[in-house]
Image: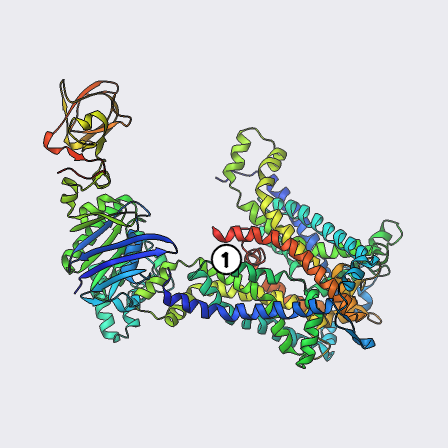
Amino acid sequence: MGRITLEKVQKKFGEVEVIPPLDLTIEDGEFVVFVGPSGCGKSTLLRLIAGLEDVTGGEIRIDGQPATNLPPAKRGLAMVFQSYALYPHMSVRKNIAFPLKMANMPVEEQNRRIETAAKALNLTDYLDRRPGQLSGGQRQRVAIGRAIVREPSAFLFDEPLSNLDAALRVGMRLEISELHKKLETTMIYVTHDQVEAMTMADKIVVLRAGHIEQVGTPLELYHTPRNLFVAGFIGSPKMNIIGGETAARHDAMHIGIRPEHMDIVESGGSFVGKVGVAEHLGSDTFFHVHLAEMDEPMTVRATGEVGLRYGDTIHLTPQADKIHRFDKKGLRIA
Amino acid sequence: MARAISPRKKLMWTALAWGFGLLIFFPILWTFLTSFKAESTAISDPPVWFFFDWTVQNYHDVLERSNYPLALMNSIIIAVGSTLLGIVIAVPAAWAMAFVPGDRTKDVLLWMLSTKMLPAVGVLYPLVLIAKYFGVMDSRLLLVVVLMLINLPIIVWMLYTYFREIPGEILEASRMDGASLKNEILYVLTPMALPGIASTILLNVILAWNEAFWTILLTTVDAAPLTKFIASFSAPEGLFYAKLSAASIMAIAPILIMGWFSQKQLVRGLTFGAVK
Amino acid sequence: MATEHSKSAARIMIAPAVFLLLVWMLIPLCMTLYFSFADYRPMRGVFDAWIGFDNYVRFVSSSSFLSSVGTTLWMVGGILAITITGGILLALLLDQPMFGQGIVRILVIAPFFVMPTVSALVWKNMFFNVDNGLFSYFYKFFGMQPYDFLSQSPLLSIVIIVAWQWLPFATLIMLTAVQSLSSEQLEAAEIDGAPPLARFWYIILPHLSRAITVVILIQTIFLLSIFAEIFVTTNGAFGTRTLTYLVYQRVLESQNIGLGSAGGIVAVILANIIAIFLMRIVGKNIDN
């Protein structure tokens, strides 16, 4: 079906090692998200799995079969690209049919699959149009349609939503998640947006400079980030990281407190500061609080409306069991 | 944001631009008019502009001179032949450079362009010698090959810039979709690059048609294209302005029309992309 | 985006073009280099394979070389001056709002597509000719003595012909460059109180500098090898013998292959100096 294993997979461009030897197993039917800042090697990793790049070392297996030296066409994977990569000179129907035509599938079977995919993706009315006549969201669906008709053993998504506007992105996110629930096929999804990762993934792989920083379910990463990088990357707004004496009092090099785990108290809290800019989202309010002991303002979430104004003095206390502690190397102290 | 332009100003610019435009175009217009005059009218003093007995006699005369149709045929064969041959050789090279760039791709491309800058006189005699050795002096084959070689860098360059505009992801998508290299080039790259390939052909036919160093020096009669044929008017006898004009108009008309279609590609092809 | 498989395919695909151009460049050039060190005059049956740098010394020290370099410089310089100034002015003019812009553009571009022998002959006979040329008629109309352009100012005549052919090229490139200038920049300058001339001098001209450089370099390369226009008008007489034409005469007319080849090599070196500058600009552009 779609179990993909990477064993000591390594990639160098010339002398530059983009991905140091790396092990990873993706179980059949899993929705795995590779997430990390730009340049972390997540797209390269995806392209190695796709076969669009050669590995420098190591072994890739798909369903136990060695696939390291197979050309992309023979791996049984389908990919959805960031730019959608639709064939501009072909109609939607021909775009979707292209992989089937390349596989010499009988025309009746081709048509049957195209109709099914088009219906599932609401593309039936657009089959005879060219990609240029479609909206961004529709193009995205054509790209997905082209991927699903092949019934691949796994889908690869390379930042598929980054060209869509914010509203559409939320909608497509849901559609892709629904698709995964329906097809139960392995999906590997690359993004730099941790919100996408958190909302869609069964399993998140956080990458930095080609290294896997942590693998886990979204909530594992949220509750027990393995190190400072993951702590800062996952969660929105970002976790507040505090060093110096304050951290030392907790026997740590740094401590991290998420904005939502900081309580505003009447007086005498752990921290005293001045209220800076407030962002009112209606349901929540995020305050930027300037503290004497920190250069950066601290972010604090308050539920609902709070009668604090710019320049007011504020007292804060973190929820004791939600303080993350990190050692000198930036690793989590259990 | 466009601002409203006063009609007076616009009329003034229009008059000025049309004035200069017609001034620059005038030699061609004058040649065109003269080609329909009788020889005696062509040199009449004062010159006549539009009101004369229009005649196509000159075109008949020129076409009946046995050499003209031959020269026309030679021009077509040489220009089209060298361009198509160049395309066949350049498409694979441009594909490789655009989609599988390596460390040396840029150097190779620049080196190719640099061969275009080699002054022709630097290799004139060896070429004459080689042509004579193979017995191909004054043959269409020789001209097709030579003009293909001098235009090959431009053809490769133009195709390269067109191919580079095609997102690599689309070709990768076709690879993921199971297309072989042959199918990738046949079903995906070529249809997408068709406008670019057509413009490249157009511009290079024009360049080859107007080439006037090798075509003059490597031909005598058999393979002489229009450039050489027209040059033979430089030492004429008797009245010939009208016939010269008719021959000239026939030599430049097809290219003028093609050229008007290829204005945009002209900038791209001849500046090697340095001006956008 | 490359795998080993596609890299090896790429090498095969690129090989024919590289091979052909390599052969085309190296074999004749090596032959010319070889002849340039030989005393080779086939008409007189002279062949001495090695005479050192004699040909170079003779070619470079001859008065015809110096005068040909002077002629070349005047010709190229004159044509560049006319086409660049004219090109900028025409580009600015064509960029103005007007009726029938497309047609004017077509009229202006037309001369570029006229084959060199045609334009040379048309100008020589129908405009410059002292008896029947249109210019003579204008001179007479204004009560002046007709002027024999080709024998009295042959160099100027050729400059006019070639400048007419290349003006469209310069105009087209300048127009492309002018149109890429954002109108917001100009509007900002206008708001800052810059009068039209200042806007031209401080904003438009600097923006065009790159295009101007490119036009100079590319035209120079093409203009250095002007041939047909001289061939059909003066045949190199009356001080119109450029370096290219001199080499042509030495090689094909007087059949002094050794001397001509030395001249050819000199021309190649001179052209390469200009080509290096052009390549730098083009090379920078490939990266982005």
Q: Is residue C44 above or below residue B93?
A: below
Q: Quadrant of residue A240?
A: top left
Q: Residues within 10 Å of mark 1 (few under 14, many from 20)?
A: some
Residue at x 24%, y 58% (from the top left corner): A8
Q: Which residue is mark 1?
A: B106
Identify the secondary structure beneath mark 1.
helix
**Residue A253, percent from left and from top:** 21, 32
Residue at x 21%, y 32% (from the top left corner): A254
**Residue B172, percent from left and from top:** 34, 62
Query: Which residue is nearer to you in this view: C1 or A244?
Result: A244
Query: Which residue is nearer to you in this view: B269 or A188?
Result: A188
**Residue A282, percent from left and from top:** 19, 31
Query: Which residue is nearer to you in this view: A187 or A211?
Result: A211
Amino acid tagged 1: Lys
Q: Quadrant of residue B267?
A: bottom right
Viewer can see residue B243: no
Residue at x 11%, y 29% (from the top left corner): A319
**Residue A175, percent from left and from top:** 20, 53
